[in-house]
Amino acid sequence: MKNATKKFLLLSAGICICCHSSGHFKTHPGMPIHITEEGKIVYYAYPNGDRVPDFSYCGYQRSEHPIPYIEAKVYVHPPQGDATAVIQRAIDYVSSLPLQDNQFRGAIQLLPGIYHIEGQLLIRKSGIVLRGSGCNASGGTVLQAKGFTKNELIRILGYDNAKTSDSLKVSDKYVPVNATFIPLASADKHLKVGDKIRVIRPCTPEWLAELGTDRLGNQQEYNFSKWQPGQYTMAWERNVTQVSKEGIEIDVPITMSLDPEYGGGYVTPLKWTGRIYNIGIENLCCISDFDAANPKDENHRWQAITFNHIQDGWVRRVTAKHFAGSAVMLLEGSSQITVEDCKFLEPVSEIANHRRYAFHTLGQQTLFQRCYSENSYRDFSVGKGVPGPNAFVQCHSECPYSFSGSTGGFSNGILMDKITVSGGNLEYGYRDISDQGAGWTAANSLFWQGRASQTHCVTPPTAHNWAYGMWTQPYGNGYYQLSHTFIKPESIFYAQLTERTGKKQELEENKIFVYHTLETAKPTVEYAAWMSKQSLHPDIRMDKWIDSMIVLYPIDCSIHDIPEISQVKYKPRKEHTDAVKSAPLTIRNGWVTRGDLIMTRGTYPHKSEPGTTGWQGIGSLTLFYPGRTGHGYTEEPDSIARQLEESGSHVLHHRTGLWYERRRNDHERNMQADSEVWAPFNEYPYSRSGTGEAQDRLSKYDLNKFNPWYWYRLKQFVDLADKKNLLLWHDHYNQHNIIEEGAHWCDYPWRSANNINNLGFPEKTLFAGDKRVYMAEQFYDITRPVIRKYHQLFIRQSVNTFHDNNGVIHSIGMEYTGPLHFMKFWLEEIASCPNHQLVALTATKDVQDAVLQDSLYNKMVDIIDIRQWHYRNDGSLYEPQGGCSLAPRQWARLIDPGTTSCESIYRAVYEYRSRYPEKAVTYNAAMPRNIEGNAANWAIFMAGGSLAKVPPIEAMDVYTLASEFQPITSLTESNRQWVMGKAQKGYLVYCLETDIHLDLSHDRKTYKVVWINPVNGEIFRKEQTRLKGGKVISLKAPQKYCVCLLY
């Protein structure tokens, strides 16, 4: 049967036997790619000028120069214990050296042995190579990643300070795929040769309509999958090589067209001083620790190596073992990076999306060649909306759980060249709503001579995709040619590179794994006998081929005439740290204070994306996006603390999310069809067991094992809070999981279907009307020993995590409408913990009053949090009852909440502040709308309420002075002015009108007067004359709604 015989690489006694094969079929003129008899590449252009892109610009130095060998400047031998500081000191030392003529500072040579890495190795300067002594069974350099953090082991990170100038509009002409000429009117007046630019293709409504991606998925209540204008704007980074009046030539072709019908394009000058370059990681092995008792453990390292904000770098001859995420992840700021001769082995994680992305790129002009991966999820992949080119050359995936290719968002200019996926698929497809609206995954991308179970190659509107010489089942309407056929050249990437540079790539072409045996259907008797002998040996795979390349082309690891790091006289620059703790968080004079400073500005708002009900957005400590940091991804605690400080807020409000991953945003109640989970992830307080299947199709939780990353992140923040005058408001429970919307219970770890702990909740869950859930009564039933046990474990974990901290306030939960008995139980458990921390009483009014009127439980409460009740405008009380298995929203539908006013807020706060003067009061209940002068929040504060959202007043220590004040009702007129103060100390007045009247007959002190803007905290004016007391005084405010300080 023609072309049906399996091909073998004959390796006998280490000798490769080469025979000529006549089974390689040629391309033909008129094909998008035609290889002539002379080996020249001819491209057929479509009528609009589009053609197959030139992918050969990928890799270090655009693959025009080999990866250099850089001499070491210092060496390191394995120390006892944690090696993080020793290796980082070597990195920092070399970082301090000057750049040499070759634009490198030097290499760090790691001697053979095992280096235990508790932390992270960070490179932030150009011209540095971190080199090991190999990675093989007989020795080499092993970086053993320790601990439960999910951080990268090695992080190469430049500085994200790119600046762009005014955009120049591309002329109203069609600019085809692979163009290097960009038409710009009067380009010579704005640009010059050598300028760095971004070529931008906008993502317009017209284009999305043409693609149909403006209509992805559910168009009803929770619309979070369709593409939005601007979401997939493409921005290619290029250099200007020629300038004329008509336009510019750029150094690398663009991989999508610029079409005037869909917004055309722009050119933006670019300056990026913080981007680093010339970084290499090579010749070592990275191994992550993990829990051997849990085959799907994720409480360990995820990424071995990540790159960002860097141009020109490499990773070579690195093996990553047991990591949950990736061997190498190249992020958006990466360009011209080569990853070669690398392996991703024995990953340990759930079998699910966003894990096991062995070799993944979000960068531009990146090259992965001769890489091997096994048991991964997406072995060789390009992320969403990535502008090209990017190339994968001669890579092998063994037994994957998902496909290799592009994950979505019209990523373009992708080359999959000689890729083998054994037991999986190669895909440039249409994924519709999958992965939050992946849609059309790839454009203007090429498969060349690959092997897989299936190839999915589709033609998206406005673009093309091609597949040549694929040994797979073909799917889709993309351009297929010469399927099940051997074609020449073996590698289109190196053929293009040779064509472009005019230089034969002999060294790299020698590393291409080629089948040299005959695939003839009419073998001779002698050849059949010889092949029978060869068949006694297994075929060679890419992992063995990589090993052979490492043997053939060794890297020099010598350390002659260089010092060991301990011999180097180098003092790293000390970074500023907040070594001094803030004053203790306490209740002082009825205020929540740190020392003398009243805590204000409420809680930092979590900014969620539209349609993401209940989702912890920006500012969440426990939001996790594998390999990604920043807003909307994994936010570092110090970054969140900085945002709090910049906003003037003192408090971060934390509670667990409603579900782990975003597919449940559709609020359906079915078990998921697969484990294609959507990131980012709301980590829960518990670890998964590695056994069974929960409703999200990941393994079930074990409520006996807490998620160390989750609690460590909270602890990190509170450690910072204790140094920065901040605090964490810690909700222990999110009652939304157990009442009202059924979807909120579906993935909750306490649901019997989702854990291995046999809590006894009925399965399948009864959803009222196939929608609502009523689990509160069972959840709060502590008469059942198993329920009581797991609540005790959780509450004590929630408190004891912060055993040496002070900056945390514990609350049962912002939506708590549960019964009195559970509130008492919760207070008892907190009181049993050894270190006293502040406790807020958040509940319905009947439960609050019952606790406060009980002398035993009253003393367990520090803060009264008014949240579930309020006074209406007419003075009546909106007062839902506790323990009725109704959520706050459900109560609001049964009883009219009415409207509130500043006066009713003041009344509620003052009543409890005066009734329990030793406790602080916070108000988080209903607020009036459209109130001028921030009056509602000032009503809270002026009545004695803590954590009110009043502005920082940087010019004055108002909130320190006010910590000695109390509300003065005799001077307060509800519709004119609110007054607090202390005789001989001062007064603070919020005036709703323009006149202030104060009877200071009892206070003869002379005061200075300052007028303050109640919205932004700025000083309106300071009175020139001082005000003497001992009488009734009148003052004229500069405006209505103004704050007056007498001090």
Image (spheres, grey):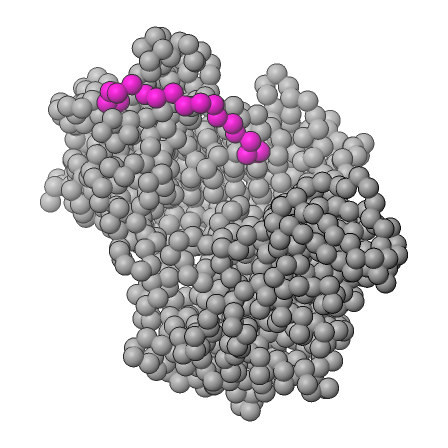
Farthest residue in the left direction? 1
x, y percentage for residue 357? 42, 49
Q: Is residue 968 visible to the viewer in this orientation of the structure? A: yes
On whether residue 770 falls in the magenta region, the answer is: no
Residue 428 in which image quadrant: top left
Q: Which residues make up the magenta segment?
A: 158-175
Q: Is residue 18 visible to the viewer in this orientation of the structure? A: no
Residue for point 61% across, 16% down = 101
Taking the image as shown, residue 617 lies to the left or right of residue 824, namely: left
Residue for point 74% across, 61% down = 980
Taking the image as shown, residue 731 lies to the left or right of residue 890, namely: right
Residue 419 sits above or below residue 66 on the image = below
Q: Is the magenta stretch mostly helix, strand or loop?
A: loop
Q: Nearer the viewer, residue 860 or 353?
A: 860
x, y percentage for residue 397? 36, 48
Residue 704 sits above or below residue 91 on the image = below
x, y percentage for residue 810? 65, 70
Residue 172 sits above or below residue 1009 on the image = above
Residue for point 56% across, 87% down = 782
Locate the N terminus by quadrant: top left
Residue for point 78% across, 32% down = 570
Residue 203 in which image quadrant: top left
Residue 755 sits above or below residue 717 on the image = below
